[in-house]
Image (spheres, helix red, strand yellow):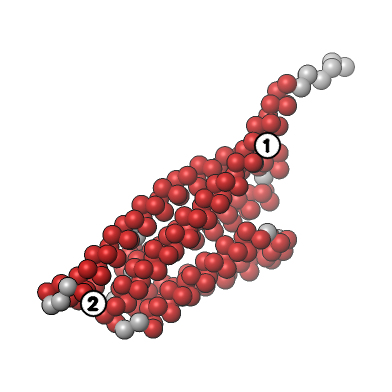
Amino acid sequence: MESGSAAAAGAGVGSLALLDGLLLFTLLLLGASLVMPLRIYGRIQGLITLIVCLLWLLLCVLVTLQAVVKLFLMMGLFVAAPFGTLAYLALWGSFPTGRAAVVLGLVLLLKIAAGVLLILAQPRFLRIKGLVILTALSVLLQLVLGFIHGFLPGPVVSIGDQFWAIVIGVVALMWALVMLIGAIPAIVNAVRVGAALTDSPPPAAL
């Protein structure tokens, strides 16, 4: 699912939104933990994570399957010389590497700025291994995507971009699944706390 400048800059840039969306969601949850009472945050965090990750899993599956189909179409046309190759070159032979580089540069700048602001706001977030790993994955996949755009010969950049879009989609899907599984204990604990509060006797009248 690509739109706007992401779609115009290639499938790889569009697929980065799948992983960066999870990163943004994680940052929003951490930000909410700073401003919300912990009692309320503990009750809703697991449920919100469960709902978002279920929807995100579905989105990742749809986008990745679409990318796989398109990659097979590209490769099929590319090797079907001469007419298939000519059709491929007409459709995908020219990749907007300049536009993609601009978008990737802006996204990387935003990630760096967000990371610096987060550390300044609360340095202990650096101890959260999941956040650090997710951020590193996002930056690494983005850097590799930029390398693919700059390294491959012009006519096959679209194929490399499409392949890496699939890789990003699979990584995002796996991370959403990990977050989904991690949300289950939080929901169970919230239900237990709620049940304990319900079953506790009312305070004695003074």
What type is the residue that disc 1 sits on?
Answer: Asn
Element on which disc 2 rests: loop
Residue at horizontal 68 percent and vertical 37 percent from the top? 189
Picture layout, residue 17 above or below residue 199 = below
Element on which disc 1 rests: helix
Q: Which residue is mark 1?
A: 189
Residue 139, image x, y percentages: 53, 70
Residue at horizontal 39 percent and vertical 83 percent from the top? 151
Residue at horizontal 56 percent and vertical 50 percent from the top? 179
Residue situated in front as seen by the camera: 191 or 31: 191
Task: Work out which quarter of the rendered image holds the N terminus and state it.
Answer: bottom left
Dot 1, how many residues are within 10 Å of its Cα: few (below 14), some (14-19), or many (20+)?
A: some
Q: Which mark is residue 125?
A: none
Residue 11, image x, y percentages: 35, 66
Residue 72, image x, y percentages: 27, 64
Residue 123, image x, y percentages: 72, 64
Residue situated in front as seen by the camera: 88 or 49: 88
- Residue 17 figure quarter: bottom left
Q: Earlier in the sequence, mark 2 or mark 1?
A: 2
Residue situated in front as seen by the camera: 120 or 48: 48
Q: Which residue is mark 2?
A: 93
Q: Residue furthest right?
A: 206
What type is the residue that disc 2 sits on?
Answer: Gly
In this rendering, position of residue 128 left or right of residue 153: right
Residue 117 visible in the shown view: yes
Picture layout, residue 107 above or below residue 151 = above
* Cα distance in 3D space between marks 2 and 1: 54 Å
Residue 88 visible in the shown view: no
